[in-house]
Image: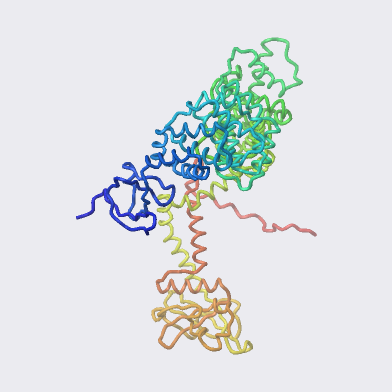
Amino acid sequence: MPPHSDIVKVAIEWPGANAQLIEIDQVSQFALRYADGPQLYITEQSRSEMKNGTILRLAISPARAARQLLDRIQSHGIDARLEALKELAKLSADPTFATEFINMEGIGTLARLVESGTHFGEMLAFTLTAFLELMDHGIVSWDLISLSFIKQIAGYVNQPMVDVSILQRSLAILESMVLNSHSLYHRVAQDITVGQLIGHLQVSNQEIQTYAIALINALFLKAPEDRRQEMASTLAQKHLRSIILNHVIRGNRPIKAEMAHQLYVLQVLTFNLLEERMMTKMDPSDQAQRDIIFELRRIAFDGENDPSGTEKRKAMYTKDYKMLGFTNHVNPAMDFTQTPPGMLALDNMLYLAKLHQDTYIRIVLENSSREDKHECPFGRCAIELTRMLCEILQVGELPNEGCNDYHPMFFTHDRAWEEFFCVCIQLLNKTWKEMRATAEDFNKVMQVVREQITRALAMKPSSLDHLKGKLRGLSYSEILRLRQSERMSQDDFQSPPIIELRERIQPEILELIKQQRLNRLCEGSCFRKLGNRRRQEKFWFCRLSLNHKVLHYGDLDESPQGEVPLELLTDKIPVSDIKSVVTGKDCPHMKEKSALKQNKEVLELAFSVLYDPDENLNFVAPNKYEYCVWTDGLCALLGREMGSDLTRSDLDTLISMEMKLRLLDLENIAIPEAPPPVPKEPSTYNFTYNYG
C-alpha cells in the first residue's frame, strides 16, 4: 500500500545526536524548522511543501521561543540580552514566529528599548534589525509608531559619526515609514531633508548610498504636488547631480542590482514631473499659448516683413505653419489637443528653437524649401517624437519592481529631458533623409527612430555627447543590417516555422555540396609520393570517372598544368570494391616506421582508400581544401556523411543565404514575370582608356 501523502521521510537533527531519517506525520510538543536556508518553521500550511530527503531541525514551538526571547531581552545581563537580540533578529524573518512575538507586545518592547537611548553598537543594530523584520510582515500598522521613536531613528541618520550597521537599518526603517504611512511621511519629512541625505551619498559604502537614495525616492514619491516640485528643483541642482554621478555611478564599480534599481526609480520619478504638461491639452482660445506657436514661426522665418493686410497676413501665416510641418495649417493649436504628449511637445519645440536656434532653423528651412515630396514635417515629427520618448522613459508611470534600467547621462545635465529631445529630433531628421521618406512613410520612419534610440540607450551612454556618438553609428543602413543579422540569429532559429524551413532546405543544400565534391573528383587532383629522400619524390594523379563508378590513377614525372586524360592513368579501382576511407594515424602509410617521422601537417593531410585486405591507395593532400574535398567526395561515393570542416562551413553559409532569400521582405516590390531582355552587343569592345 503506498504511503499516505501527509507522511514524508525527513532527517531530524537534535543536540548531541546525528541526523536520522524517520517518518513523521505531526509533531505535538515541539516544532520543526528547516535546517538549511532561512530555517523557517513548518506549519500546517507549509508542511505540504516538504520534499523527500529534506533535513529538518527539532526546535521549541514559536510561542515558547517568542516568550523566552522576550524575557531574555528584558533581562539585566548585557551578554544574555545581546545573544537574545541576535537570535531574535534571525527568527523575526519567520512569519509564524513574528505573529507570536507581536501578539506578546514584542514590538512595543523593542520600540521602548530604542527610545530609551541606552542601547549602542551591536545591541542597537540587532534591535533595529529585529524591529524592521517584524514590521515588514505587515501584521502591525506603522501608524502606531510613536513620535519619540521617529525622532530617535532620525537622530541616528543625522549624526555625523554613527555606526554603519545602525545607519543602514535606520535609513531602511525611515523608508518603510514613508512608504507605508501618509501621516508618518509628514513627521519624517520634518526631520529628514534631501540636503541632509547628501552626505550619505559621498561615502564609499554602496549599501549606505543605496538606502539613502531609496529614502530620497520614498520622500519624492509620497510628497504632495507642491512639495514634489521643490524636491525636483533640489535634485536638479548641479551639486547634487554631480555627487550622484561622481560618488555613486562612477565611484562604484560594479554597481549592484539594488543600487541600479534605486537610480532607475529616481530617474522615473524625476521624469514623472513632466506628466502634468504631458496630460495638459492646449486651449486654442488661449492667446498666451497661441503666442508660443507664433514665436516658433517668428524664429524660423525672421526677417520676412508682415503684409499690412489682415487677409494677406493670415494667408502668409498659414503657409508658414505648413512649412513648419503642422498638420493643421490654419490653426496649429489643434495639433496639441491630444494627450499624451499635450503641451509637453510644445515645450520641447520652444526649448529647441530658443536654446538651439541654429539647429532649429536649419531643420525647418532645409525641409520647407524642398519640392520633391521628401520634406520632413518638423511639427508633426516633434509631437510624435515627444510621445515616443514618454513611452520609452515611462513618463507618468510608476517604477517597475526589479527593473534597473537607469541611464547615467540623465544625471549629467539639469535639462536632461529637453537636451535628449534635441538630440533625437536631429536623429529623426537625419534618418528621414537616409530613408528618402515621404509623408506616406511617416510611421516607418518613427519605427526606425524608436529602434535607433532604444538600441543607443541599451549601450548605457555616459553623457549626451556619448549618446550622439552611439546614434551616429546606428544609421538606417546599420539598422537594416542589425535586423537582418538578428533575424537569422539563433534565437529566431528556434521558432517552429524557421526550424521547419531549415530542415526543408538542408537536404537540398547537402545534395548541392555533394555534387560539387563529386565534380571536383571528376576533375582530379595531383598528389606527391612520399619517399625516404625528398629528391626521389614523384607525382601521381587520381580522378573519378564521369559515371562515378571507377577511380583512375597513375604516376607522373612532374606536376601537371591542366587536366590529365584517362588514357594516361593506367590503374583503376572500381568504386564498388572500396571498403572504407581512413584518415590520419589510421592510414597504412602513416603507420610505417619511416612515416612516423613525418610532421603534424602531413599527418593532418593524409587519407587512404581501403579496397582489398592487402591493397590500399594512400594519399597526402597538397592542402587542407583538397583534403576536405577528397574525403567528402569519397564518403559521398560510399553513401556516408560528409563530415569535414569545409562541409560544415559551406552548409552554414549556403543555408543562411538561402533562408535570407526566402525570408526577404518583398513588400511593395514588383517582381516581373518575364526576365529582362538581353541588351544588344556594343559596336566596339575597346573599353580601355588609351593613356597614349
Write the residue at 54% across / 50% down: 485
x, y percent for residue 344? 60, 24
Write the residue at 40% across / 50% down: 496
x, y percent for residue 390? 56, 31
- Kindly indicate the quadrant of the structure image that contains residue 122: top right
Residue with the most extreme right position: 692
* Residue 675 or residue 175, whichever sits in front: 175
Is residue 499 positioned above or below 407 on the image?
below
x, y percent for residue 582? 46, 78
Q: In which quarter of the image is the C terminus?
A: bottom right
Residue 448 seen: no
Residue with the most extreme left position: 1
265 on left or right of 368: left
Q: Quadrant of the N terminus?
A: bottom left
* Residue 340 or residue 141, whichever sits in front: 141
Is residue 288 positioned above or below 371 on the image?
above
x, y percent for residue 480? 57, 45
* Residue 432 or residue 423, whichever sits in front: 423
* Residue 249 or residue 129, whichever sits in front: 129
- Kindly indicate the quadrant of the structure image that contains residue 237: top right
300 on left or right of 453: right
Residue 31 seen: yes
Q: How many numbered discs sit on the rendered protein?
A: 0
